[in-house]
Image (cartoon, rainbow, N blue to C red):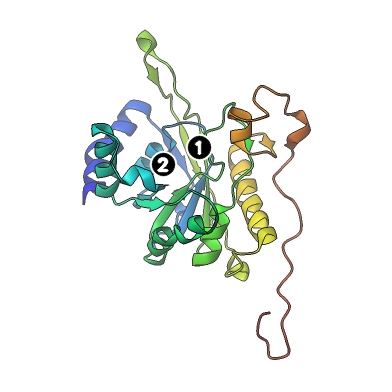
Amino acid sequence: MWYQVFKVGLFGPGVRALWRPWVVGEENLPREGGAVVACNHISVLDPIIVAAMLDRQMTYPAKKELFQGDHGLWSKIVAWFLKAVDQVPLDRSGGKRSVEGMAPVLTRLGEGGLIGIFPEGTRSADGELYKGKTGVARMALHADVPVVPVALIGTEPVKGRFGIPTVRHPGVIIGEPLHFSELAGRQDEVAVLRWVTNEVMDAIQRLGGQQYVDVYGFRVKYGNLKGKDLSRWRRPRPGGTPAPAPRETDRAGEQR
């Protein structure tokens, strides 16, 4: 209930009135059933704009610590809001815990919900598209649902009147769903996860036209590539390798 209250009564009208966003490809968003909506990430406003402009309810996995509300008043407000608008916690500590911590996300997909994710894992520092993390592939293959690529354009805040930050006519381009059912159940194979992730990032790149850089964005923002020349990592597209070979089968036809 609270999701619709905030969307219809506040965020939806506010986003449309203030920023006049445009949307292309609305017909590509499945009208029902579970799907992962994978977007590039160039602004802190991206989740709000996507949720406001898509007809269906969006669920964004948020790190589980935000749901605890144990760090003062503001953290309590954030925790209440996330729970009220029916978002789900995600364990991002790594390893086995992260895999097990994906259960709420998989449950939501199994219920026919839309999961929104930004595979780059952090906002782009310069507007270029960076290497995707494989969580998007793991979700899609585990739940056997399509991935809908989305390119966000012009969502970066700019200075408006009196120096107040604003956004000028941002765009949301929704691509055709990507189906990976032939690879479903292979979410434990590293090569498969990387190939699927690269295909998703390639679709996002083709929609939005960003330059692709084959390193993780956090290395450029905070790590050993901060302030460095990235020419050697620029690529025409993510991946480009052949699709993973089918699993070998035994004489009984069972997968090994």
Where 98 falls versus 219 (above or below)? below
User: Residue tagged by mark 2?
Assistant: 50
**Which residue is depicted at the point 25% across and 39% down?**
76
Q: Are marks 2 and 1 in contact (CB under 8 Å)?
A: yes
Q: Residue 92: x percent and y percent?
A: 48, 48
**Foreground residue among 59 and 50:** 59
User: Residue tagged by mark 1?
Assistant: 152
Q: Residue 91: x percent and y percent?
A: 44, 51
**Foreground residue among 62 and 31:** 62
Q: Residue 117: x percent and y percent?
A: 48, 47
Q: What is the tally of numbered marks visible in this picture?
A: 2
Give the left or right position of residue 67, taking residue 219 as reference.
left
Residue 28 appears in the rendering? no
Give the left or right position of residue 152, taking residue 31 as reference.
right
**Which residue is depicted at the point 64% across and 42% down?**
131
Report how far apart the C-alphas of labels 2 and 1 lie in the structure: 8 Å
| SS at mark 1 in the image | strand
User: What amino acid does circle 1 point to?
Assistant: Leu
**Which residue is depicted at the point 27% across and 32% down?**
74
* Snapshot quadrant of residue 187: bottom right
| SS at mark 2 in the image | helix
Work out which quarter of the rendered image holds the C terminus and state it.
Answer: bottom right
The first of marks 2 and 1 along the sequence is 2
Residue 43 appears in the rendering? yes
**Which residue is depicted at the point 32% across and 46% down?**
67
Residue extending farthest bottom: 252
Give the left or right position of residue 102, taking residue 195 as reference.
left
Where 117 falls versus 124 (above or below)? below
Q: Residue 173: x percent and y percent?
A: 51, 42
Question: What is the crowding at mark 1: few (fewer than 14 residues within 10 Å), some, or many (at least 20)?
Answer: many
User: What amino acid does circle 2 point to?
Assistant: Val
